[in-house]
Amino acid sequence: PEDKSLMRACVEAARAKLNGHLIGIPNEEHRTFHLTVFRHLDNPFVLGVLEAYWDAYAAVEPNRYADYAYHQSVWDYHEQILEAICAGDYDRAQALFIEHTRLLRYEPRANGAEPPRQPDQDDVIEKGAP
């Protein structure tokens, strides 16, 4: 329950930053949300890799351009993932997480950013598929 509350607080703080008068990028909330999802893994190696990823993300991401629609889409996914977890629908949470990671492939174009493409169901890897 406290993990879900922390994740909900991340979503709310991120929305406040993105929708406030002075827009802020919720980088710390992003890190906290993801690390909380995986906090209970009983695998120190994987947890170490995740920590290293988020350390690298913190060093690079604040200096990268991403348009407003991208940030909103990221947090739409986070909210949907949290709702699926709270409902106990872990298969849906996993599918949403996979879709969410595909946003990383989106790069704005210099001549005008296009919004991230929403993956369709054919893009989602079936659980247990190779």
Image (cartoon, grey):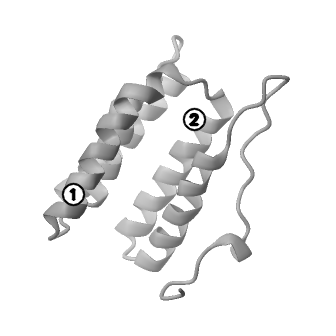
Q: Nearer the viewer, residue 11 or 32?
A: 32
Q: Amino acid at mark 2?
A: His
Q: Which residue is mark 1?
A: 47
The secondary element bearing badge 2 is classed as helix
Say if residue 9 shows up in the picture: no
Q: Is residue 95 above or below residue 58?
A: below
Give the residue displayed 27% in from the left and 54% down from the top.
Answer: 49
Give the residue displayed 33% in from the left and 41% down from the top.
Answer: 54
In the rendering, at what x and y percent does residue 121 appear?
70, 74
The numbered disc on residue 1 is none
Mark 1 Cα within 10 Å, few/some/many (few <14, many 20+)? some
The secondary element bearing badge 1 is classed as helix
Question: Farthest residue in the right direction?
Answer: 111
In the rendering, at what x and y percent does residue 11 appear?
41, 42
Relative to 8, 6 lies left or right: left
Give the residue displayed 69% in from the left and 71% down from the top.
Answer: 123
Query: In front: mark 2 or mark 1?
Result: 1
The number of numbered badges drawn on the structure is 2
Say if residue 102 shows up in the picture: yes
Give the residue displayed 35% in from the left and 36% down from the top.
Answer: 56
In the rendering, at what x and y percent does residue 65 appear?
60, 24
Q: Nearer the viewer, residue 20 or 113?
A: 113
**Image quarter hosting the N terminus:** bottom left
Q: Amino acid at mark 1?
A: Leu
Q: Nearer the viewer, residue 90 or 64?
A: 64
The numbered disc on residue 71 is 2
